[in-house]
Image (cartoon, rainbow, N blue to C red):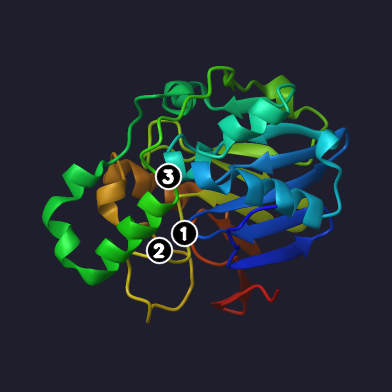
Amino acid sequence: MSSRTARSVVSVAPGVVFVEGPVSNWVVLAEEDGVSLIDAGYPADTDLVLDTVRWAGHDLDDLRRVYVTHGHVDHVGGIPGILERFPHVEVLAHADEVDNVRGPGRQQVTPAEIGGRLAAPRVLRWLVRALGSDALRPTEVPTVRAFTAADFAGRAITPLPAAGHTDGSTAYLLPAADAVVTGDAVVSRHDTQPASWAPRPRMITPFFTADQDRALESARALPIPGILLPGHGPAVHRVGRSWVPVAS
């Protein structure tokens, strides 16, 4: 049982549970052969991730795979702890993202590179939360492999290219839920952004992104879903021309 607490846990469609974690998000997905995760939070989130699998009504022994949106530590940090207990779990990522996921080095901004931005109180608060989530713990996922089209044959999930935030960033379309899981390709809000900003699809704070121009191009190419399940911020859904948080 985790001592950490999710900000919200929402069943957005049958078999799809969205978790707005303490600092970053993940999705619990019921599949034909068991249960999968899309991302897995920070290293300190492992127990909370597993708690949310149980909350969604699944047996942990039915956990089969983790689909990765991108290899930043706030999205893959919980995976090593999961693999320690469930070594059969597959970890799948875009071929261009495998090295980022495997680690220990990865295409990610460091606290030193954030530099003078720490003068902004909200950036400092975010960094404190990240460090409290074991952001600096060396994270390696040696068993990650590149997914292929065959991995999605007959499944209700489709990978979508979303490069820019990292070289192999990937979004995942869940057609039955009319939802897209975007990782950090599109977020609804981030802790480094003003708290007054209403949740809606937006770009993450640029200094987190490897190639902002490419990220913008990728974001514009993504389908506009009924429900957006972002890597940061609450799940939001369309109501007319507006976006509102999905009720828990």
Alpha carbon distance from label 3 to label 2:
18 Å
Q: Nearer the viewer, residue 161 or 41?
A: 41
Mark 3 or mark 2, earlier in chain: 3
Secondary structure of the residue carrying numbered label 2: loop
Return the residue nearer the eye: 212 or 17. 17
Q: Amino acid at mark 3?
A: Asp
Give the labeled residue for mark 1: 187
* Callout 2 amino acid: His
Residue ID at (68%, 64%): 9
| Residue 204, x across and y down, in percent | 37, 57
Which structural element holds mark 3? Answer: loop
Q: Are marks 1 and 2 in contact (CB under 8 Å)?
A: yes
User: Of tags 1 and 3, which is closer to the observer?
Assistant: 3
Give the number of the disc on residue 203.
none
Quadrant of the rendered image containing residue 13: bottom right
Please name the residue that numbered disc 2 is placed on: 190
Name above or below for residue 106 compared with residue 72.
above
Height in image: 236 above or below 205?
below
In this picture, residue 156 sits left or right of residue 184: right
Residue 187 percent location from the top left of the image:
46, 59
Label 1 sits on a secondary structure element that is loop
Locate residue 214: give its quadrant.
top left
* Circle nearer the N terminus (1, 3): 3
Residue 106 position in % (x across, y down): 35, 29
Q: Where is residue 231? Give x, y as percent.
A: 51, 53
Q: Which residue bears the numbered disc 3?
A: 134
